[in-house]
Amino acid sequence: MEYVYAALLLHKLKKDVNEANISSVVKASGTEVNEAQVKSLVAALADVNIDDAVKAAPVAVAAAAPAADAPKAGGEAKKEEKPKDDGKSEEAAMEGLSSLFG
């Protein structure tokens, strides 16, 4: 995941998204660099227009969450229930991420 973040950061800063730059960013974060993963990512991004991919990526709507936490007009806040974590949201996020880079 840190390699994808490094690639996005480099792209946003209008730097070349290449093996040396991604390795530098990952090293700067304090993480050990796996050269095979860096090469794989650079190869996967070779034919991808990152701007188009970012625009096409689904965006989670977080604006509705604070409204749900607001107390009702009666003055008494509703007891908060935690949703069950069945792993489906993580799978959906990974599918979205994989579609981002082909």
Image (cartoon, rainbow, N blue to C red):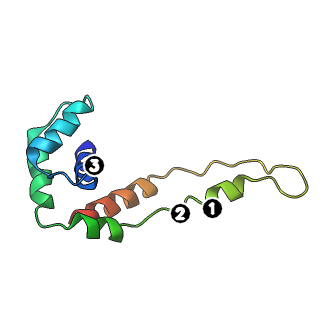
**Of the image marks 2 and 3, the number of the one nearer the N terminus:** 3
Mark number displayed over residue 64:
1
10 Å crowding of disc 3: few (<14), some (14-19), many (20+): some
User: Picture coordinates of residue 37 (x, y %)?
Assistant: 13, 45
User: Picture coordinates of residue 6 (x, y %)?
Assistant: 24, 45
Q: Quadrant of the C terminus?
A: bottom left
10 Å crowding of disc 1: few (<14), some (14-19), many (20+): few
Mark 3: secondary structure: helix
Task: Classify residue 53 by image quadrant.
Answer: bottom left
Image point 41% across, 53% down: which residue?
90
10 Å crowding of disc 2: few (<14), some (14-19), many (20+): few
Q: Are marks 2 and 1 in contact (CB under 8 Å)?
A: yes
**In front of the other: label 3 or label 1?**
3
User: Picture coordinates of residue 55 (x, y %)?
Assistant: 34, 69
User: Picture coordinates of residue 24 (x, y %)?
Assistant: 16, 36
Image point 14% across, 52% down: which residue?
16
Image point 32% across, 62% down: which residue?
95
For the residues labelled 2 and 3, the Cα–Cα distance comes to 22 Å
User: Mark 2 — residue?
Assistant: 61
Q: Are marks 2 and 3 in contact (CB under 8 Å)?
A: no
